Image: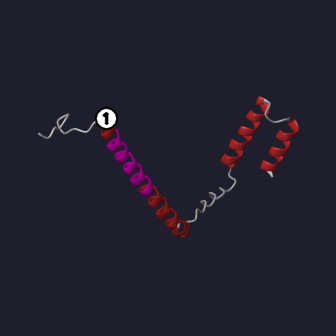
Amino acid sequence: MPLRMGRGGRPGLLGTVARTAVVAGTATATSNAVNNRARRKSAEQQPQAEQQAPVYTPPPPPPQQPSGGNDVVAELTKLSELHQSGALSDAEFAAAKAKLLG
């Protein structure tokens, strides 16, 4: 009796589905293993990275410029504009002007 191959040696529908399931399952398991390993390495390196991270120190404030004639005039002009626009009341304007003039 001769050996009958059927579809030319190709797997049937169930064989194809089974092979696809095995390939997909293997790919998922491999992906999960790689992600878990990366997560573990990151967690192990995290405390070391925190110790080595530079501490942020804000820059010092700019030095105050001495009160000169031009600065006082500019400040008085700003105060006057704020007073005229209504942002400063008469009392606030007078107090700021007195403080500026000394």
Amino acid carrying mark 1 in the image: Leu
Q: Is residue 39 above or below residue 5?
A: below
Front in this rendered view, residue 27 or 18: 18
Front in this rendered view, residue 4 or 38: 4
Q: Is residue 36 above or below residue 14?
A: below
What stretch of residues is rendered in magenta? Answer: 17-33
Residue at the top extreme of this rendering: 85
Q: Residue at x 20, y 34 (%)?
A: 7
From the top left corner, tell me how far across and down residue 64 is, in percent: 66, 57
Front in this rendered view, residue 70 or 17: 17
Q: Position of 89 compared to 24: left or right? A: right
Residue at the left extreme of this rendering: 2
Q: Secondary structure at mark 1?
A: helix
Q: Residue at x 78, y 30 (%)?
A: 84
Location of mark 1 (residue): 13
Q: Quadrant of residue 19?
A: top left
From the top left corner, tell me how far across and down residue 71 is, in percent: 67, 47
From the top left corner, tell me how far across and down residue 93 is, in percent: 82, 39
Q: Is residue 28 magenta?
A: yes
Q: Main secondary structure of the magenta part?
A: helix
Q: Is residue 50 above or below residue 81?
A: below
Q: Residue at x 71, y 38 (%)?
A: 78
In which quadrant of the rendered image does the N terminus lie? top left
Q: Residue at x 67, y 56 (%)?
A: 66
